Structure formats: structure tokens, C-alpha cells
Image (spheres, rainbow, N blue to C red):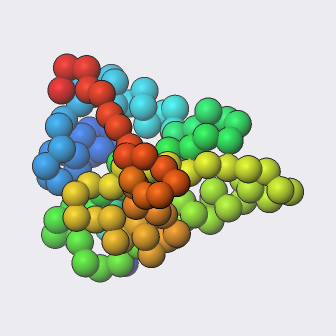
């Protein structure tokens, strides 16, 4: 049975990054990033983390969803959907009392449709330009 927790060890996080084809990070750097997350949700199968997603925030109105990933052997089981549901519920709670919250994310190629189901808009569009990125030491 999959359970959702608000933690994941840095080593497991890094292993998950590698399993989905992303670059591994320095463990101290990964640990700092995880510790400084505004919100983190991780799917666990017994003692093994199998998926995760997190939010970083300026503490005002700007948020960014990052690290949405599910181990390949666990994909297609609704884990990613539940991770995004957990995040959206947390983000929606921030917008209570009329506060404006801007939620950003950068979808991996081909996964835009998944995020559209959660209310995200593909960019560029007639109101917003393309998202951009700059890597240092990729």
C-alpha cells in the first residue's frame, strides 16, 4: 500500500533523480534543497520512497513546483496524480482569504497534458511567453 509522507532522504531523492534520467546532485546540496522546500510530498511503498514532488516558494505569492517524479516501475499507478493533488490542496490553502498565489512549473517534454488536468496552462500562449531556464554547471 502506498502512503504519503512529508520527507525523503537525500540519497533516496538522488537515486530517484537518476532512475528517471535526471542528473544526480551533490548530497549536501540535495539535502539543503529538500530541507528548504516549502512543501514536500513523497510516496512510499513500505520503507521505499517511490515518488515525490515538492514546492519552493518566496513566502509571498510566488511558488514553483519542482521534482515531480515517480520511479519507472511505479508509473501508471496514479502516484503522480496523487502527488499533484497533495500539492494543489496545500497551495489552495495558501490562497484562502483572497491571497494571490502564482504557481509555476516546468513540465518535462511530453507531460504537459498531465499538468493541464490540474489547471496549468501551456506556455507560450497568447498571454504569456515561453518559460526559460539557465543552467550553471549542468
Viewer-closest of 7 and 106: 106
Left/right placement of residue 14 relative to residue 83 reads left
Viewer-closest of 56 and 106: 106
Residue at 17%, 37% in the rendered image = 23
On screen, residue 89 above or below 32: below
Quadrant for the C terminus in the image: top left
Left/right placement of residue 11 relative to residue 73 reads right
* Residue 4 in the image, given as x and y percentages of width and height: 47, 64
Quadrant for the N terminus in the image: bottom left
Q: Total marks drawn?
A: 0
Left/right placement of residue 64 relative to residue 58 reads left
From where the camera sits, is residue 54 visible? no
* Residue 71 in the image, given as x and y percentages of width and height: 22, 61
On screen, residue 31 above or below 117: above
For residue 9, what is the image quadrant?
top left
* Residue 101 in the image, given as x and y percentages of width and height: 67, 49
From where the camera sits, is residue 87 visible? yes
Q: Residue furthest front?
A: 126
Residue at 24%, 40% in the rendered image = 14
On screen, residue 137 above or below 132: above
For residue 111, what is the image quadrant?
bottom left
For residue 134, what is the image quadrant?
top left
Q: Residue furthest right?
A: 97
Residue at 52%, 32% in the rendered image = 36
Residue at 26%, 55% in the rendered image = 108
* Residue 123 in the image, given as x and y percentages of width and height: 40, 55
Amino acid at each position: 500500500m502506498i502512503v504519503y509522507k512529508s520527507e525523503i532522504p537525500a540519497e533516496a531523492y538522488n537515486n530517484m533523480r537518476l532512475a528517471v534520467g535526471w542528473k544526480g546532485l551533490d548530497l549536501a546540496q540535495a539535502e539543503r534543497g529538500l530541507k528548504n522546500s516549502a512543501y514536500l510530498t513523497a510516496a512510499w511503498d513500505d520503507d521505499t520512497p517511490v515518488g515525490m514532488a515538492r514546492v519552493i516558494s518566496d513566502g509571498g505569492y510566488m511558488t514553483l513546483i519542482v521534482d515531480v517524479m515517480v520511479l519507472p516501475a511505479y508509473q501508471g499507478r496514479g502516484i503522480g496524480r496523487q502527488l499533484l493533488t497533495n500539492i494543489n490542496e496545500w497551495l489552495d490553502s495558501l490562497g484562502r482569504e483572497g491571497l494571490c498565489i502564482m504557481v509555476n512549473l516546468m513540465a518535462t517534454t511530453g507531460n504537459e497534458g498531465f499538468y493541464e488536468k490540474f489547471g496549468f496552462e501551456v506556455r507560450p500562449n497568447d498571454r504569456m511567453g515561453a518559460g526559460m531556464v539557465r543552467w550553471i554547471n549542468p
